[in-house]
Amino acid sequence: MIKSSKRSEWHYLKKNSELLLLLLPGALLILVFAYLPMFGVVLAFKDFHYDLGFWKSPWVGLQNFKFFFVSDTAALITRNTVGYGLTYMILTTVISLGLAILMNEMGKRWLRIHQTAMFIPYCLSWVVVSYLALALLDTQNGYLNKVLETLGLPTHMWYLETAPWPYILISAYLWKNVGFSTLVYFAGIMGINQEYYEAAKIDGASRWQTATRITLPMLSTLITVLLILSIGHIFVGDFGLHYFIPNDAGMTYPTTDIIDTYVYRALRVNGDIGMSTAIGLYQSIVGLVLVVTANFVVRKINDENSLF
Amino acid sequence: MKVWKRSMAHLALASLILVLMLSACSSNNNTSSNADKNTDTPAATNNKAANDKTANAATTDDTTKNEPAPAEEPVELTYYYIVYDMPADQQEVEDAINAYIKPKINATIKLKPVMEAGYKDKINTMLAANESFDLLWTSNWGGGDYDNKVAKGALLPLDDLLAKTPDLKAAIPDVAWDDTRVDGKIYGVPNMQIAAKAEGFAIQKRFIDKYGIDVNSIKTQLDIEPVLKTIHENEPDIIPIASTSNLFDFGRQYGYAAQGYKLGDPNFKIVDTIDKPEYKTFLDTMRRWYTSGYIYKDAATMKDDQLVALLNTGKVAVEWNTTMKPGGEADDKKRFGNNDVVYVRVSEPEFTGVRPTMNSVSHTSKHPEKALEFLQLTSTDPTLFNLLTFGIKDKHYTVIGDNTIKINQDGGYKTDQGWVFGNVLIGYLKEGQAPDTWERTKQLNETAKRPEVSGFNFNTEPYKTESVNIAAVGEQYAKALNNGAVDPAKVLPKYQSALKKAGVDKQTAEMQKQLDEWLKANGKK
């Protein structure tokens, strides 16, 4: 019995050898950059000294975690991190699904233009975008204030106010990321057998009906997989977005600060490897718990769609 | 699903083996190449010895004389330091330096300039990776990170090594060496420059002349108000004052020492200055100036590079300056868009120590003695110092007078950062600096008033949890408040309560304990 199972495994490997070979470089990269460094989490429980090194530095228990949890703003920052994470996830999914379905209805020539226009922001770094944002939001010379002025509306000191930032950050995030996920969903739609659509057309289904009755159900696996994956990132904020777009301006922190920016700011002066590792570990653990829970829930509802 | 899982396990195993093999290969390579190096010289000498057997006695003598030479192969040192502008001709200057120092100390140097913004991260990453390098620039501000690096064991104590470089020890006064000590040990070689600082204003000369401003009437920071008012009312295109950090020095204005005690207090009681009524008064004044239009509207959110660009336009009339170094007007003229500036002091020069710029030896250094020999040269040898600071003669600068040069702005090495490398007092003067600049600097260093607690430094380790959170709170509120950009009546109470919650009382108590111990040990209390 053992023999036969071994043979079938070997057969399986042989049959898919080309595909597995293609997978190998990616798997190696993940191993080197995601799994090997995991030993480093030990530092979260140590008071790291360069001359004592990794092994000999003294253990300090949970001391490195303390600074974050005793800070007055821990609750606020957690709220911001999770709130923004959820909003980004939900809005990106809804909007890019909608756009992907619309693109499916579009002529080839227009399609290419739209794809390119939507995809370009994804390639820009937040640092570059932050200068664009500054040109818009600058108090004295910003485009937005000039427009408000000509319209006779009161101008704002954007970088000193808290209220506008959720809207600004969410718009910036969507502007940058929707293009990419639209492409992913669009590729998913392209993979759906055209016969369904032809059959629906013959039966006289409206466009709305084809979208809700064929496209969405056929994409449900892809949607849930992408959702589960992004749930793991809810607790790991987008540092670039939250640091560069508000220009690291102090008065905006109540609505822009997330774990990543807070930790960066707190440790910028007193760069402590142990403390930074501790927060990284905390974020990873929460992320893992979220992914496993989400997967568990999905499996309860529909086993087919779950990730593992 | 099952097949998939099993094959994953195989794949993981296969890739793990591959990684191990790769790492084994690379480490093999290393050891074998090292072994090659080691065996190389004996084999060569053996050959020589064999040949010598047939030769006469005289040549044998020669080879034995040459024998120790291979052991003293020139050492290559690596030196990381901060720059604000990457020089284009770095390699060329490095080659010239190596040609100069190799016969002197039998070592070459690999210069590794790192841009200011990434300096601290780069050094910390290299230290964490246990990478071998020899020299690094350190300081008590910004990326230099001296205290923290000492506390974390990243730097070598230099006391014993300095015994072997007596010229270096002698070139720098003992007060300067003492200022670098942590728990009695020296971890940094101070770069000699201005070590006495005064505070005051840099004011564009054209406005002083135009409006007949009496600079002698400016005795304290708040006396600048009429100047700002005049400029604001008469020069609509000019920004009266701009800065990126705290606009003024609250402690100076109201008589608090940097450590937080009231000057003249026999008990040296450290207080939370943010909680004092004077701070509220100070902020109210700043707010009034801001709303009157004296302070640049974006001051609270502007970054350093934006300020540099703004100053370059020549549109800023006044800047708060916390160094007031002799000859500084020449540098500031360039910064202010080639407009002459006048320095107006509001405080007496005070010895602020040498910690703002030092060079240290990494604990990963393989040649600490050679590293110190190199620093000995940068502190005592004008030729090397000028090469490092100004580059190559007639290419990067031209000599225009007795020990005075003009930097070629298109020359590819215009960084002009003598303060990073060694003793600026042995270097060239720049166009516009008076011939007695270095004499005045030396004199100022010697005569400057010494603060009562000169030599004392806080050790943040015992209150690290509090200090990181206090730092974060400070970044949220301080800049906007100190520049008058927000209403102190609304924001100051929030700042104060956030500080309290971050543990400012515990920090103050711990600081007081350390200061008291130091005062007792030094017989001042």
Image: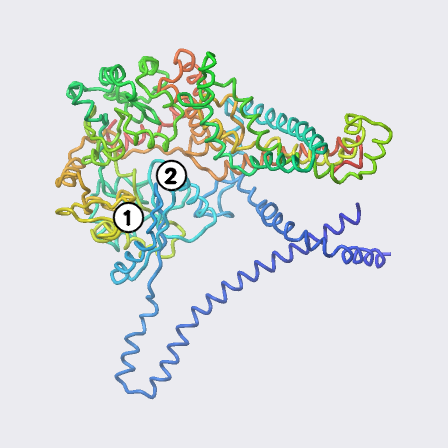
Question: Which residue type does callout 1 highlight?
Answer: Gly
Circle nearer the N terminus (2, 1): 2
Whether residue B87 sits left or right of residue B522 in the image: it is right
- Which residue sits at x=40%, y=11%? B489
Q: Is residue B272 something that shows in the picture?
A: no
- Which residue sits at x=44%, y=30%? B468
**Vertical arrangement, residue B73 with respect to residue B386, above or below:** below
- Which residue sits at x=48%, y=33%? A264
Nearer the viewer's eye, disc 2 or disc 1? 1
Residue A25 numbered mark, or none: none
Q: Residues within 10 Å of mark 2 (few under 14, many from 20)?
A: many
Q: Residues within 10 Å of mark 1 (few under 14, many from 20)?
A: some
Q: Quadrant of the N terminus of chain B?
A: top right
Residue B143 numbered mark, or none: 2
Chain on which label 1 sits: B
User: In this orientation, which residue lies closer to the viewer: B318 or B193?
Assistant: B318
Chain on which label 2 sits: B
- Which residue sits at x=17%, y=21%? B210
State the CA–CA distance, disc 2 to disc 1. 27 Å
Kindly indicate the quadrant of the structure image that contains residue B251: top left
User: How far across and how far down the image is residue B375, in percent?
Assistant: 27, 51
User: How far across and how far down the image is residue B173, in percent?
Assistant: 20, 43
**Vertical arrangement, residue B123 with respect to residue B91, above or below:** above
Question: Which residue type does callout 2 highlight?
Answer: Gly
**Residue tagged by mark 1?**
B411
Q: Quadrant of the C terminus of chain B?
A: top left
Kindly indicate the quadrant of the structure image that contains residue A294: top right
Element at badge 1?
loop
